[in-house]
Image: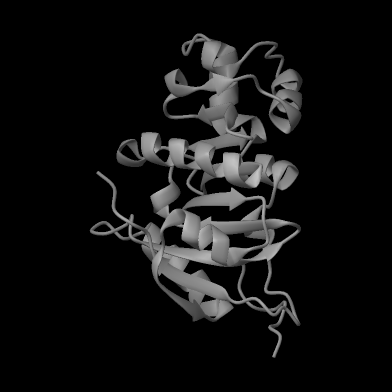
Amino acid sequence: MGTSDSEPLIRACWLSWLAVATVDQGEVAKALGLIDVRETTWADGVELIDEVAHDEEEPFSAVVVIPPRRGWTLVVGPYFGLPYPQQTAHVSELCRKLSERFGKAQLFFHSEQNDGEAWLIAERGRIIRCWISEYPELALGEPFGVERRLLDAYGITGKPEDLDPNSDLAGDWAATWGDCWATTVADESSIDPTAATAEAGSISKMWVAVAPAFA
């Protein structure tokens, strides 16, 4: 039986996710080494996404695999959070390796509290852009697409990581990151999960799984 578009949208105060350019959920789960994989309803999956985002004891354990759409499979959970120092290097390299296998892989972090935005875009084993607003020193590559257009609209001709943090331009941009949120970049580059709804008639289900620990 299909699900209804009236079911809840994906929301969390701090939302982290991985996007992989494939509709094969099983291959993504296998590549990530996910364990204890089980099906869940859309409503329960959405609720878990928000719960895990607020879990202070084990935030990097549970992940939710969203049914594929428009050629992409998304896996959601703080495990993929670029701004979390204990995760950054691991998930960045993981995303790069996934792009070798699947052609494209991306990481995103969006805060509804306006306290951080991040994305990493990888293609064919190469990171072409990484931006973490809280750690501009970790930026890689050149802004492109919607990020470049919004920077231009703010009069920023270079890269945000090169701005003097005490300048008016830096202050204007950081106030709302120029409306250049992770969801904005994801909507153009892959899938914005906050706009995703349960699709009536879909044969795929949400999955809940445990992400593997890493050294």
166 to the left or right of 54: right
Identify the residue at image location x=55%, y=66%.
26
Q: Quadrant of residue 37?
A: bottom left
- Observer able to see residue 53: yes
Note whether 128 is above or below 87 in the view shown. above
Please, is residue 152 above or below residue 85 in the view?
Answer: above
Residue furthest bottom in the image: 1
Quadrant containing the N terminus in the rendered view: bottom right
Residue drawn at (52%, 70%) of the image: 46
User: In the figure, residue 88 lies in which quadrant?
Assistant: top left
Q: What is the quadrant of the C terminus in the image?
A: top left
Q: Position of residue 64 (x, y in %)?
A: 48, 65
Q: Is 121 situated left or right of 48 in this image? A: right
For the rendered model, the colour scheme is: one colour
How many marks overall?
A: 0
Identify which residue, 70 or 146, lies in the foreground: 70
Q: Position of residue 145 (x, y in %)?
A: 75, 30
Please determine whether, in this image, residue 72 is positioned above or below residue 117.
below
Q: Nearer the viewer, residue 41 or 96?
A: 96
Residue 12 appears in the picture as rendered: no
Residue drawn at point x = 32 percent, y = 35 percent: 85
Point 56% across, 61% down: residue: 27
Estimate the x, y position of residue 51 in percent, counting from the top left.
Answer: 39, 66
Horizontal arrangement in the rendering, residue 63 relative to residue 57 (left or right): right
Q: Position of residue 91 (x, y in %)?
A: 43, 41
User: Of all residues shown, which one is farthest toward the front?
Assistant: 101
